[in-house]
Image (spheres, rainbow, N blue to C red):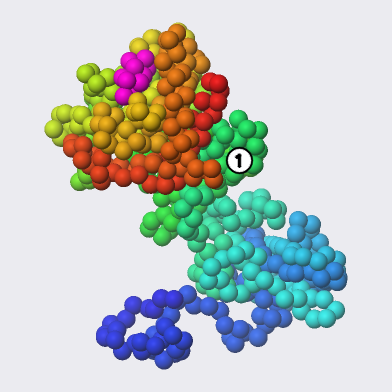
Amino acid sequence: VYSQAFPGDFRKIKPDFCLGGSERETGLEWYPQRWSGEADGNREAAGGHRWEAVFGEIEPGQRIYGKTSLRGDGREIMIQTGAGGTGTCDRVRVWLDQTEILDSCQEQKTACAAAEGRHMVTVMVERSGRSEKGNYPSVEIYTEGGPVCCEMPERICGATGDWMYLGPFENSVPVFRPEELTLNRLYDTGNGGTYWRLDGKDNWVRPCLQNELFGRWNYPLGVTLYGLLQTGRHLGENGITQYAASHIAQCVQMQEYAMWDEAVYGYPQINNQLCTMSMLDDCGSFASAMLEAYSEIHEETAKTAVKAIAMRVADHMEHVQERQEDGAFYRICKDFFMENTMWADDLYMSTPFLIRYYQMTGDAVYLDDAAKQFILFKKYLFMEREQVMSHVYDFKYQTPTKMPWGRGNGWVLFSLSEVLAVLPEDHPKREELLAFFRQLSEGILKLQGGNGLWHQLLTHEDSYEETSCTAMFIYGFSRGIRYGWLPDEDRRYRKAVQKAWEGLSKYAIDRKGNVYGVCRGSQYSFTPDYYKYDLTSRDNDTHGIGIVLLAGIEAGKLE
């Protein structure tokens, strides 16, 4: 609960108030203000709903919805509508679950059987031009034994009462079916957006997200979901693909709401990275998984949202994201630690999405941009002597950091394999990209560790063996062999894949599926000590789980 803002000495508030004291003793007004049945004895008689407390006066032709739930015991229940005042001519429609059981402009009673279990009751009131202002029809729900005890229809933390409300809607908006009235969307009233409300004035439901691993939009989970999608397909396990698809569907369905939430409350409570979208990390990885999952998403509202979000992400990459004069992506991030830098990571945060958006739209601009980025990033980050990539180029000092971070190189090889798999044979940059793939693969191959894993800093054998880069090198090498991009007459790459997978199986994955040795999310440095000692590994880190799954799939396909 929250008090009103007040002047004076806050110490006058009794310290035991939080242990059960009375609000009245504080002398303050407290929020949220909950409607009290003491103020109006009609609440129980009217089935517990309070249209006027929520909506006040609404205009003729507008519609409002109420929703509650009840538990049936096999007995017949009665639903009766009553007039709100003399001359009232409101239309009332009532659904039990998804079956309409009453539609009337008059006082009316209907009876229906309610099997044992929980049932949803949805009520729509459409205001008539002849209705008295401030008077709403009642909806009573009872059995022969008396009033039915209704319950809040959704699990909403902090909610009291037993009804949820939505509206008012203009008559130009089509009537919603009960199954359309969910928590997973924003509603267009015909005069702006709205969301669910509870009893009382300005008492709104506000979704928030506390689950770290489901329904959340961020780039590591984008990688994880891509791995889950491909794993489900490879194993024929529909439950895995549907888990990933439902995670993505929840994110995209709530995006319109999230933007509204930001406008109303000042900062979005969910999907905040997608709402604020200031860098490639915010959109590219998850949006790529989103497009990959499109065929597995079945809700039409989610499929529509996917297309709208993809268009917005594509516009950000092509017209908003910072670029050097030559067109290379980089990060301005003013007054932030990464100000004026280019990261090898950003090839993954951009190019897999660009090629999938090309596949969706047929617009070759996105494919050409994806191909061009590899040529440009190589110009800034490729270390000729070592034949691998530096993690970051710092434009403040006009120099690369010359730190060959394992996962940074993994992002490059992994993403380049994604682009080459889609790039037409006659594309003007194909041969240049194939040459880069072979050159980078050769440099990485030479640095494989004795246990089959690659090191956190590829050229530093005293840095720890790192799981995510090893998995991405397995993925890239396996695809290179299968697609014929890598010369493997002497089976060097095939042996490296086998040795690496054996190393992961022995050192990085236990029999319960836990994944160890994945480097956590990084900053950057010009010194190797940061990568060796500060940038430590974590168990079951989402930066690595999906990549390990993908590595297993590709190693299996190679076998």
- In the rendered structure, the answer to whether residue 45 lies left or right of residue 528 reads right
Instruction: Please tell me how crowded label 1 is: few (under 14), some (14-19), or many (20+) other residues with Cα within 10 Å.
Output: some
Q: Is residue 14 visible?
A: yes
Taking the magenta stretch, the answer to whether it contains residue 512 is no
On the image, the x and y values in percent for residue 20 come to: 46, 86
- Please tell me whether mark 1 sits on a helix, a strand or a loop: helix
* Quarter of the image where one finds residue 196: bottom right
Query: In which quadrant will I find the N terminus?
Result: bottom left
Q: Which residue is mark 1?
A: 240
Which of these two is toward me, 73 or 320? Answer: 73
Relative to 413, residue 125 above or below: below
Q: Amino acid at mark 1?
A: Ile
Relative to 465, residue 139 above or below: below
Residue extending farthest left: 397
Seen at 15% across and 29% down, the residue is 398
- In the rendered structure, the answer to whether residue 113 lies left or right of residue 481 reads right
Query: In which quadrant will I find the C terminus?
Result: top right
Seen at 31% across and 35% down, the residue is 456
On the image, the x and y values in percent for residue 505 come to: 48, 35
* Quarter of the image where one finds residue 366: top left
Residue stretch in magenta:
436-447
Relative to 288, residue 49 above or below: below
* Quarter of the image where one finds residue 393: top left
Seen at 42% across and 17% down, the residue is 493
